Every structure is written in structure tokens, then in C-alpha cells.
Image (tube, helix red, strand yellow):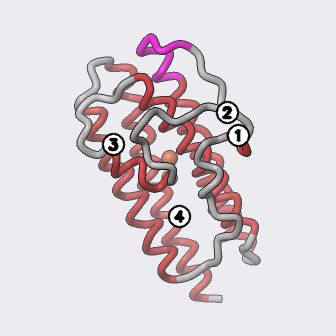
Amino acid sequence: MYSLPAGYPQDAFAVFAFLKDKKTLDTEDFIVLALVESVGELFYQTLARGLDNAEARSLIERNAAEERGHAHRMLKALRLRGGGEFELPAIENNPFFALAPKEVPVSTDLFGVLETAETDGDAQYQRWADGEPNAEVAQLLRLNGVEETRHCERVQQVKALLEAA
Ligand SMILES: [Fe+2]
Ligand SMILES: [Fe+2]
């Protein structure tokens, strides 16, 4: 199993806050972000499984699929920065798996938390892109960011769908 570098939080949700003040990401940070995004996929898959509304479930499944795409973009960024190859481990071997919830019950609070996390995630990716010396890597960071805002919008759509049901 890949061990997190010293000092990193064990909780995927805490990693963005931990890296908040970092102007330029290190190659190690790209690996950790890929692992966080991979657990993001699992999180949305778990949430989707608990939804009865088919439209809501499909919106959340799209978020899940895009989080996986984000993980792969970070591995591409790692290569572009000369950090070599890293293969995503099976999800059970992801260091953030232990604290990932096994069930995600729907609540107003949950939607609020996700809206904030996704919106903050976009802002964070744009800041990292601003500090990124490699233009191609900066573009990958920006794409992840833009999609985090889209995730927030899908969460809002799901909230509206479930409220109307
Ligand atoms: Fe993401
Ligand atoms: Fe997201």
C-alpha cells in the first residue's frame, strides 16, 4: 500500500485544506490528489447506491465518473512534471479508504457540505493553476476545477429532484 507522506491528513476531505496555502504543488502532492480524487469516485458511488430516484442517481454517477477522470489528470500532471508513473491502487489499498464512509445517508446537511467542498475545490484548483510553472499541468488543474463546480451544480439538481419527489 502507498503510504502518505509525513504530515498529510488521513481523511481525504482534509487534504484540500491541508494543501490550501501551497503555491505550487510538488510531484508527491499530485499522487496524493490522485488518491483523494479516486476516493471521491468511491464516495459518489456510495451516495448513488442509496438513491432510489433514477435521475438523481445518474447525476451522482456522473460526478463519480468525473472524479476518476480527475485522478487520471493528476497522474498525467505527475508525468508532465517528471514525477514518473504512478498506478492507482485498488480502492481497498488507497490510504484514504479507511476513513471513507461505507454509507452516505442523504440529508440537507450532506448537500450543503458537498456544495461547499466542490465550490472550494474549484477555487483551490484555480489557485494551484495560477502558481503552476508548467502550462500543460496548469490546464489540467483548471479542467478539474471547472468540473468541481459542475459537480456542485449536479448536487443542487439532485437536491431539487429529491425535494420535489
Ligand atoms: Fe474532483
Ligand atoms: Fe467533485
> Between disc 4 and disc 1, whose residue precedes?
1
Q: Residue at x 43, y 66 (%)?
A: 115
Q: Residue at x 47, y 80 (%)?
A: 109
- The residue under label 1 is which amino acid type? Asn
* CA gap, disc 1 and disc 2: 5 Å
State yes or no: discs 3 and 1 in contact (Cβ < 8 Å).
Answer: no
Local packing at callout 3 (Cα closer than 10 Å; few below 14, some 14-19, many 20+) is: some
State yes or no: discs 2 and 3 in contact (Cβ < 8 Å).
Answer: no
Residue 93 marker = 1
- x and y, in percent, of residue 155 in the image: 52, 67
- Return the residue nearer the eye: 158 or 70: 70
What is the magenta range?
A: 76-84
Q: Residue at x 59, y 54 (%)?
A: 63
- Residue projecting furthest to the front: 6
Residue 1 marker = 2
- x and y, in percent, of residue 130 in the image: 24, 33
Q: Is residue 142 above or below residue 76?
A: below
